[in-house]
Image (tube, rainbow, N blue to C red):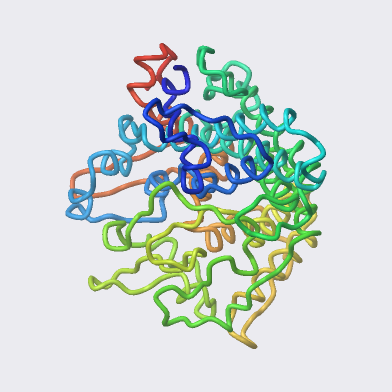
Amino acid sequence: MIYRIIGVSVLTLFLLQGCNEYLDLKPNKKLVVPSTMADLQAIMDYPTMNKGPFAIIEMASDDRNLSKSEWEALPEDWRQNYIWNKVGLNDQLIWNEIYQIVYNSNLVISLIDNLPSNVHTKDQGDLVRGSAYYYRGQSFFDLAQVWALPYDPASSSQALGIPLRLDPNFSEISFRAMSETVYQQALSDLHFASALLPVQSNHKTRPSKAAAFSMLSRVYLTMGNYPKALVYADSCLLHHQAYIDFNTLDTLANAPFQNLNAEMILFKTNSSAISRTRGGAVSSELLELYDVDDLRQNLFFGKRTDGGFHFKGDYSGSTSLSFAGLTTGEMILNRAEGHARNGDVAAALADLNELRKHRFKTKTFTPFVATPEMDIIALVLEERRRELCFKGGLRWLDIRRLSRESKYAITPKREWPGEVHELPPGDPRYAFMIPEEVVAISGMPQNQY
């Protein structure tokens, strides 16, 4: 079964909403095909649909510092991932979980046209169909950020991407599509979803038009298409531009943010969370970016017993979950970078100041003012690091995409006494190893180092 080859167990696909709806529990275990719009909506509402593969690549970014003893206490794959060893993310569980989302989406797409049109409304059908295309497009993009090299328009038509599964047929052979094909498929799915989904969802766990526009902006930004990243960030913000006044939050709380808060466009978590006790200290380089009156310093970070700091500002409102969804803050910064790349300093500064005024102590906020020597792109990139740290691997995505630009490229570095690890721009380790079992069974080529 080819979906098992790429990591999906067929039985689990129907164990949804109490499992009795999709699995006949008689001895022959006969599978029952979902046959109503409620069945398909239940598949789209299953919690694993809102998961992403970014827990471990959060560890690969430069926002954490592990001591040697903390590093040695981690699981083997996390240890190797932290120092960018090529075997670091040979994790089939994460691969399985994301392709599970792809399969569920394909299943819904394949079944929805067969349902009688007189038993559901057009809005119900559009929501389910739009959700399926949204989740499939998002998943293709997410997978490419882990198992394919950073997108490069100069080589994307020859660079290997990830397998594209476009239907639930188990008999088709899996192969790695070219990077350009992967990104174009993700964009196609998200564009189609944006035309079907409601402007706002009744539940932040369900995709909306604003969420589809937000993901389109993220994909275009990653591809370096800054005009379109700006357009879709702006389209999202037309429908969703709510902010949290950080002055209303408790800086002493262990989890100062509420789940499903006003800034959240779509709820999503990492496939597994990095615990505060095992995740290492927050990078001193990151901490030094915050002004003394910037409330993010005390809302995002808490003191460790060793004097360092851990991240506590998760938008899930939890000390155990790890938020990886979409927010107003990300979109205002995508739009700001689009303006900055276009040379519109005034518009970029307006976006930065709009965000920052909600982040500073009352009466302490001083807006940025343009100066002749200002590097507006660098200013936006620095604000992205302050605002988007530990939000579903966004720092890793920025490191990857900026590796194409000599002026803004970042070389993450780990230093221990007598030992230095670096990840320079263009390094093949920006694509992690495809799980060995997947390669062995499917025959698809492994990433080369």
447 in relation to 244, above or below: above
Q: Quadrant of the N terminus?
A: top left
The answer to whether residue 161 is left or right of residue 190 is left
Q: Position of residue 363 (x, y in %)?
A: 64, 88
**In the image, what residue occupies the spot 41% across and 48% down?**
55
The answer to whether residue 389 is left or right of residue 435 is right
**In the image, what residue occupies the spot 75% across and 46% down?**
124
Q: Position of residue 46 (x, y in %)?
A: 53, 47
**In the image, what residue occupies the spot 27% across and 49% down?**
415
231 in relation to 429, above or below: below
Q: Quadrant of the C terminus?
A: top left
Q: In the rendered image, which quarter is residue 309 located in?
A: bottom left
Residue 415 visible within the image: yes
Q: Position of residue 182 (x, y in %)?
A: 61, 26
Please identify the residue farthest to the bottom as the structure is shown: 363
**How many badges with numbers are in the image?**
0
373 in relation to 174, above or below: below
**In the image, what residue occupies the spot 64% across and 23% down?**
180
Residue toward you, 18 or 432: 18
The answer to whether residue 233 is left or right of residue 421 is right
Q: Position of residue 118 (x, y in %)?
A: 82, 39
